[in-house]
Image (cartoon, helix red, strand yellow):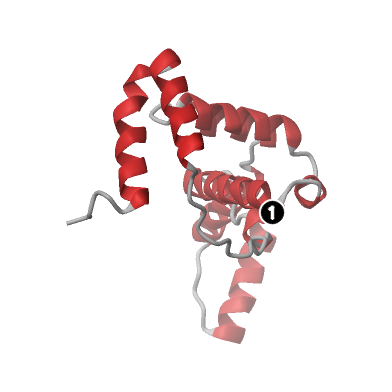
Amino acid sequence: MGEASEAYNLLDAHLKATGDDTSLLAITKDYRTRYRERHQSISLDALFSEYWESKEHLSKIHRKQILYAKHRFNQLQEVLDDLSAGTQNRYIRLLKSMWAFAVRKGYSKESPAANLDFSHLPKKGTEIFSNEDIKRMLDQAFAKEFELVPYLALGALLDSGLLQER
């Protein structure tokens, strides 16, 4: 009762000084909301797991990369510095997506991955496969992954200019 009385006295003084007639109930509700937001968190491990579970529609390879990243990331930038530029960019995209997911779920107010910069990858010239390379690819596909043969054949024709895009 004494604390409530003191709180009301502080509110009265605040009202006189500022003209703001906020109620003790409104202040208490606001405090509880801010407290929940500040203390609602999730471990990085749990965040990775929940993010991974929400991505069942992705390919097995992509989901495997998420799990691999989960095991590698303790200190974000230190881990990224040891990777090639292309791999860094792939993991940064994953981390930014995952932290955006965490923010949407209310686990975090902001994304620590937002401060990570993509690595610059110099543009490379277009390379054309030799006839021998195309033959080897087609032979391998024919022997092991027959369903790839039409895609490789069409790709080789497009690459060679024999088949014109319309």
Determine whether 67 is above or below 102 in the image: above
> Quadrant of the rendered structure where residue 24 is?
bottom right
Which residue is situated farthest in the front direction here?
A: 132
Q: Residue at x 51, y 36 (%)?
A: 133
Left or right of 31? Residue 134 is left
Instruction: Decide: few, some or many residues near mark 1? Use Cα within 10 Å; few <14, some 14-19, many ≥20.
Output: some
Left or right of 161? Residue 56 is right
Mark 1 secondary-structure assignment:
helix
**Any part of residue 144 in sight:** yes
Quadrant for the C terminus, please.
bottom left
Residue 50 at x, y = what percent?
54, 30
**Any part of residue 55 in sight:** no
Left or right of 120? Residue 26 is left
- Where is mark 1, residue-wise? 85
Which amino acid does the dot numbered 1 rest on?
A: Ala
Which residue is situated farthest in the left direction here?
A: 166
Residue 102 at x, y = what percent?
55, 44
Residue 131 at x, y = what percent?
45, 39
Q: Residue at x 22, y 54 (%)?
A: 164
Residue 141 at x, y = what percent?
42, 22
Q: Residue at x 80, y 51 (%)?
A: 81
Q: Nearer the viewer, residue 7 or 33?
A: 33
